[in-house]
Amino acid sequence: MFWLYNLLILLSIPVFPLIKLKSKKRGNVSLKNRLSSFVPPKARGRILLHAASIGEINTCKPLIETLKDRIAITTFTDYGLSRARKLFPEVPSRVIPLDFYPLTKSFLKRGRFRKILIFETEIWLSLLRSAKELNIPVYFISGKISEKTFKRLQKFKPFIFPLLSNAVFLAKSETDAIKARQLGFKETRVVGNLKFAFTQPEKVPLTVKGNRKIILWGSTHEGEEELAVKTHYYLKSKGLNPLTIIAPRHINRKIPTPPSQTTFRSQTKVVEENVEFYVINTIGELSSLYAYCDVAVIGGSFVKGIGGHNPVEAAAWKKPVIVGKHVESFEDVVETLQIPKIEASQISETLKKLLSNEAERENLAEKIHKNYLKQKNVLEKILKAIGESD
């Protein structure tokens, strides 16, 4: 069956241009690079980390930063490769070769990799077989197995069992670990979700004049700024005196706030009492600015098609956090932290209740932060499990 799989891989090569056209969401897949087993000279003898695309590279950032002098990166998409090279120009990287046995065997032989780290659950059968034959240890880090994936893999368990029996599964949760054990992984261990590996930065300067409650809308998208403005005026009508800080995900977009009531981070770090909206049009400061808010609202979650953004940065500052219903990309993080998911129509009343009740704000912040503390050492657990802790 392994050779039938490779035959199907071989036969898929002529349709790669079609795959490229259909893969816009995850980025392009370069056929030329996928058919090469070239290994950058600097990558040889290193640890190989495979992370599929942009989101996976972003999540792996703390791990890559820790291991950057001893790691090489492969991605599945050209977009992921571009992101890896932008963040880590000093780390050798390339797209992963097509999962065709002669290619993967040649690639791993040339690379002489000490070990292979696979983020989440990218199961490539030829890669796993090649690693087993070359005695290269394989670790699935921050591993997850959805119910759909589990059912599909169970059908091929007799076929994949010999390949998985050489791999260690470092699971996000006990649920994922149980599935991994049933599939036949050599060893399973719960280490947690790498998305929790956040290093809290130093506070950047900000002075807000007047006795005001601060709402920070982080990483907002089109449609969410309008919601923030509408909510702001609702809270004003109820006798509250909020300052609404808006940090758009893309800073060059025009934000629909009244010019006479708005000031920008690039212009000043002091917010006067007559300012209603403070727009963060600078890069790299959002995670620090969460330190100043009374409530954090995470964007990308009140409109469809985005999937939300990481709430860990706000949780680390011990802030009450709320998100919208559309958090598909961070569902596991939101559930673990027990962050309330709110409909857009409920946001005004929810914020009114939180801003009017200090005890309720503190209780929510305490609960979320406590859950965060249980998870924050995930990077240390992963490094220890793969034998790379100093």
Image: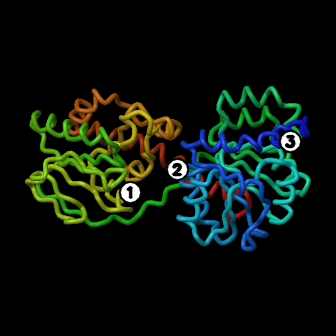
Residue 155 vertical position relative to residue 228 in the rendered view, above or below: above
Report the residue marked by disc 1.
287
What is the CA distance from the residue labelled 3 to the residue labelled 1? 46 Å
Numbered-mark total? 3
Which dot, 2 or 3, sits closer to the camera? 3
Identity, as a three-letter code, of the amino acid under mark 3? Asn
Q: Position of residue 44 (x, y in %)?
A: 77, 70
Q: Residue at x 74, y 51 (%)?
A: 139
Q: Residue at x 11, y 38 (%)?
A: 236
Marks 1 and 2, how far apart in space?
A: 14 Å
- Mark 3 highlights which residue? 6
Disc 1 on helix, strand or loop? helix
Split into 4 quadrants, where in the image is the N terminus?
A: top right
Residue 190's x, y, as percent? 67, 43
Tell me, yes or no, if residue 356 can be seen here.
Answer: no
Quadrant showing the C terminus: bottom right
Distance from disc 2 to disc 3, alpha carbons, whole Å, reads 37 Å
3 vs 1, front mark:
3
The residue shown at (31%, 30%) is 344
Q: Position of residue 281 (x, y in %)?
A: 29, 59
